[in-house]
Amino acid sequence: MNTTKPAKKKSPVYLIISITVAIVFWQILSDYIVQNKFILPSFTDAVLAFIALYASGVLWIDILTSLMHFGIGLALALVIGVPLGICIGWFDKINQLLDPLIEIIRPIPPLAWIPFAIVWFGLTNFSAGFVIFIGAVFPILINTYEGFKSIPRVFVEAGKMLGCTKSLSLIRYIALPAALPHLAAGFRIASGVAWMCLVAAEMFGVSRFGLGQKIWWYYNLHQMDNVLVYMLILGFIGLLVDYIFRYGMERSLLRWRVGEVN
Amino acid sequence: MGSVDISDITRIFSREDGIDVPALENVSLTIEDDEFISFVGPSGCGKTTLLRIIAGLDRSTSGSVMVDGNPILGPGPKVGMVFQEYSLFPWRNVRDNIAFGLEMRGIPKKQRHEIAHKFIELVGLQQFEKSYPFELSGGMRQRVAIARALANDPDLLLMDEPFGALDAQTRNKMQVELLSIWERSKKTILFVTHSVDEAVFLSDRIVVMSARPGRIRAVVSVTIPRPRDRTAPLFASLRRDVLSLIEESSKQAND
């Protein structure tokens, strides 16, 4: 009865080829054409820089600090964005009341909030978290709202006919599970935006440690090989976070959706 | 339990351009306990609207509906409904769909799983207890929907073209099953259908409605003993009578 096709196995050969070719090309480009470590450090420069940074131990502090900023921002965005999205998605009057405000605040780029973040919260971890929160809250809010708006009416009516008649139980037992795929999509978009805001927030000296802070720090020291290492680490952690999230979602919460999407 | 008293129901829909469209006009009908009633009629005769009003999902402009002497003021577990479209909750497996109403009433997990299991057996889906709706065929889904409505033990079961999306063969099978469930569980069933054949096969009485505005045109009693043979002359002549009643009423509506 299971109609899902097994995912086509991707051969790792292509992955290895593409990465190897890119590294070789990069090495040749920097060693023989650019010939300037400041403009383009080579692959081996990056590896050596990584080893040195890893040995110094500061790399871990930066990673943990950044993950903490990321966590504060994303957790705040969830705690505020999801309930607010539910309210405006379920109660039309609240939607009419809040929609104009949301539409005015939403287009302000999150990075424009950095000065106020510093004025309000000082040069603290929470300050960085706040900027990330601004970036992450809107995708979560909008997707929760969209999810609630697109619930088929028949689910709500079927629930009512079975004795689930109060708003709160309808939200909990019908609307929230029905909207979960939308919520998951919103959370994924939000975590991408949050990761971008993280770098900018840290660059502005909101914090003394962090991956973004170090990029700017090493740029000022003209150590571009270290800058490159931090860039790559940002990329890898972003990839990893997205992967863990996708894996967790698909394995547990959204098993029932398998047949709905395809 | 499960008598229905529909008295003088009128439903007027106000369109956005300000024109009022009467969907139902002065509909009155008394339904006995444990009766199987079908509603047939041309499209737009308000069958579904009437059913939704009885369910409490829609309000009549005037008139009232009483179930066992109590007025219907809103949807609730005393009245069950099987919808035309697939209404199973896709995030719950078969068992948890069927147990939904019991869960809402606060019945403990173990007990509601037992009750759900009984109804899964009733509709013959034992192997699919843990399956999700997307894994089931259309006919199976509607069987689960029927089981879900029955598990809540309503006095009255409303069915809005529940077999409309099924192929002819599955449909005939489901009709036989529905009758056997009805005979065992003894509930009043109000069944909306487009198919006169289905109505004659299933019902004690067939309510023929006319369109624009929806009115009751005739109530036809079906006295053929069950199980009914679709090819019997009596069956055919009754079907012909009902069809001609529908045809006349749709002609009137177009004049």
Image (spheres, coloured by chain):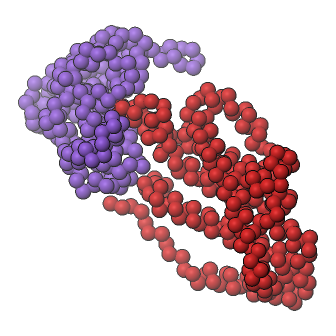
Chain colours: A red, B purple
Residue B92 relative to residue A78: left or right: left
Q: In the image, residue A152 lies at what x, y percent?
A: 47, 39
Quarter of the figure with residue B35: top left
Quarter of the figure with residue B221: top left
**Depicted B124 relative to depicted B149: above or below:** below
Quarter of the figure with residue B159: top left
Please name the residue shown 42% across and 18% down the image: B59
| Residue B255 can be seen in this image | no
Residue A125 relative to residue B3: left or right: right
**Depicted B113 relative to depicted A238: above or below:** above
**Depicted B131 relative to depicted B84: above or below:** below
Please name the residue shown 86% across and 80% down the image: A40
In this view of the protein, which residue sits in the foreground, A236 or B87?
Answer: A236
Q: In the image, residue A114 lies at what x, y percent?
A: 83, 50
Please name the residue shown 30% across and 27% down the image: B79
| Residue A16 can be seen in this image | yes
Q: In the image, residue A154 lies at what x, y percent?
A: 42, 36
